[in-house]
Amino acid sequence: MVFQATTSAPVNIACIKYWGKRDTSLILPTNSSLSVTLDQDHLRSTTTSRADPSFTSDRLWLNGKEEIVKDGGRMSTCIKEMKRLRKELVEDKDPKAPQLSTFSVHIASYNNFPTAAGLASSASGFAALVSSLAALYALPCPPTTLSLIARQGSGSACRSLLGGFVAWEQGSQSNGLDSHAVQVAPESHWPTMHALICVVNDAKKGTSSTSGMQRTVETSPLLQHRIKHVVPQRMIDISKAILEKDFDSFARITMADSNQFHAVALDTSPPIFYMNDVSRAIIAVVEEYNRVAVETTGKVKAAYTFDAGPNAVIYTEEANVKEIIEMIVKFFPQQEKFKDPFGLFGAQGLGEG
Ligand code: PMV
């Protein structure tokens, strides 16, 4: 008998950024965060897991290249936790069930976009890993439970197990059992919302989120202000904006939070620069576009946000997608790729010109 399962998980792009861990081994964050999970058709990781009694160790191939599964590392923690759930929830209850928790697994994962370029590849990667093992092990678990395990692979991965608008509640318990993802609203709640991915540079990023966060937690006074006095209210306000489909508020909070996250990176010692000149030019173009929109309608029409890399994501509503793509391509004409992960337009892209 072959024990194998394949599943996919999409990338999510945070509007309220997770940056900082209070527990580095369980991956418990210093603040709650909120993101939009992109649809399955575009940026995603697809993962196949196979269990077999002939396998002698857990092994992983990422985009065709074998990666070491280090004992005690994040990958091995996720695999171990999934085996524990298989034993507890399936094998202990039904002694006739195949004892898959005792077999080693071989896992192959592919990203259909650049890995580790600030496009949240670790989020979709760990989410797809956990969901493929959940399918292989036939676990009767809701996504929220699985998000507890994906979180231990990469914090932001916990949000990719749910679709639509997703909050990661930081929780307060030291065992992390209340630090998981919850859906604020499904994608169908706001189907006119689009995310335009502007690939400024798809090279691997300079400072990993793990070492960047650690340095920020240790050295940035602004981070302390952010986690105590800024994020809690933003979480409430952006959830309300989403539930009311209030794009203007959603966009203003998203841009402010991206800017504060990059200010916190700059406030780190030594400072971390994730954006580059092209990123800053995109901010200027979107700010000017919004200034004109506010003059005529009183409301902004686009929101930029940047993760730990130079690539921009622009959130907007369907009616403005074409206009924004034309504007970006006009200002950044030399680019090759420009993707709309919600699927309306293929397009050109950005580069560092
Ligand atoms: O989950 P990590 O370690 O890749 O950290 C992600 C951090 C940001 O992408 C910058 C913000 C976020 O909330 O996704």
Image (spheres, rainbow, N blue to C red):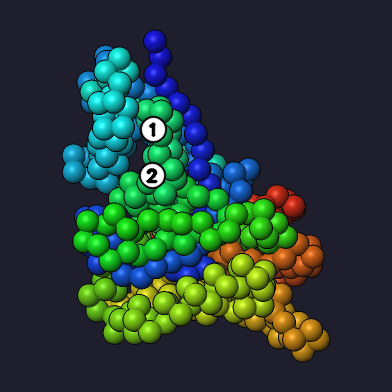
Q: Residue at x 29, y 54 (%)?
A: 177
Q: Quadrant of the C terminus?
A: bottom right
Is 188 displayed left or right of 96 in the figure? right
Mark before the other along the chain sequence, 2 or 1: 1
Residues under numbered marks 2 and 1 in contact, where contact means CB atoms less than 8 Å apart: yes
Whether residue 217 is situated above or below residue 294 in the rendered picture: above
Q: Residues within 10 Å of mark 1 (few under 14, many from 20)?
A: some
Q: Could you tell whether 197 is left or right of 256 in the image? A: right
Q: Position of residue 68 (x, y in %)?
A: 27, 37
Element under disc 1: loop
Q: Is residue 10 visible?
A: yes
Decide: is 216 above or below 92: below
The correct choice, above or below, for 284 with respect to 38 in the image is below
Picture residue at 67% right of the left edge, 53% below the top: 188
Whole-percent x, y for residue 21 in the image? 28, 65
Residue in the image at 33% along x and 22% along y? 51
Query: What is the C-alpha distance between the residues marked 2 and 1?
Result: 9 Å
Determine whether, in the image, residue 8 is placed left or right of residue 228. right
Dividing the image into four equal quarters, which quarter contains ligand 1?
A: bottom left
Q: Which residue extends farthest bottom?
A: 295
Quadrant showing the N terminus: top left
Q: Please identify the quarter of the rendering in which residue 245 is found.
A: bottom right
Q: Residue furthest left?
A: 71
Q: In this rendered view, identify the residue nearer to me: 203 or 237.
A: 237
Residue drawn at x 30%, y 50% as measured from the top left: 152
Residue carrying label 2: 146
Which of the 4 quarters of the picture holds residue 140? top left
The three-letter amino acid code for the residue at tag 2 is Leu
* Residue that label 1 marks: 139
Kind of residue at disc 1: Leu
